[in-house]
Amino acid sequence: MVGEGCTSTTQARMARVNSIKRPTVRDQVPSLFSVILVDLCTATGARCAALVDQEGETVDYGGSGDPFDIRILAAEWRLVLAQFQAAATLGTVTQLFVRARDKSFWIEAFPYGYALVVHMGHRCTHLSQRALSQARRDLCREAGFLVDQTEAWTRVAVKEESGASRRPLVLGDEEEAHYLTVLGRISSVAKRERGFRVRLATGEERTLVREPLGQWYIEEERFS
């Protein structure tokens, strides 16, 4: 949640993210997979995303575009991933990032031959790894897969301090708000990101990061 003191540039970015069109006609009843994929598109500005199986069949999708076109896109990139995985000289291939002149794509292997395919926004050169972390975890949980990852991030609503500092004040919405104690800034985050070490009301200490599109993420417990 962007604070009241956000700049016009940030407001414009958030307007683009929040105005992402959803398919006006679906060819299947949306599942919880669709909810997760729509959240991924909203958080990153991606045009669409799909979960596809080893045969190239789309399990579900989210974002903008014609459902048939999304299914064809997902099937074709699943085939490309399979070709890379079959090339013994490349070793183990689990992720592909393809940048074209007017569009980019992220393809990631999932257990049992499934894959996540993301059609990124115009001239997008980066996809939030925190948003991917959450989507990966949520999709695998919904599918009943085990996921091996060393870090987990969850997108959260944060009320910010007015001005340029973007200091987090409150975690959550009005119905369930938790006041935060900021312990310090974190300098190791990427350019245009703001990281803070905070103490929750429970006494736990966590890391909060604000990404360029105004999305806030909290670091969960690490596991393997």
Image (cartoon, helix red, strand yellow):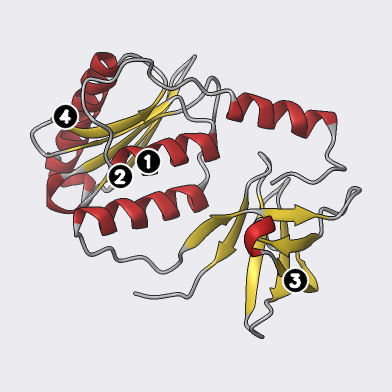
Q: Which mark is residue 25?
A: none
- Depth check, front residue: 91 or 149: 149
Q: Secondary structure at mark 1?
A: helix
Mark 4 vs mark 3: which is more N-terminal? 4
Mark 1 sits on what residue? 35
> Disc 2 vs disc 1: Cβ atoms closer than 8 Å?
yes
Q: Quadrant of residue 78?
A: top left
Q: What amino acid is found at the position of numbered circle 3 in the picture?
A: Leu
Measure the C-alpha gap from mark 4 to mark 3. Answer: 47 Å
At which x and y percent is residue 144? Answer: 19, 59
Q: Residues within 10 Å of mark 4 (few under 14, many from 20)?
A: some
Give the spatial CA distance, label 3 vs label 1.
29 Å
Foreground tag (4 vs 1) = 1
Disc 3 marks which residue?
180
Residue type pointed to by label 4: Leu
User: Which residue is depicted at the point 50% across and 39% down?
Assistant: 127
Q: Nearer the viewer, residue 177 or 209?
A: 177
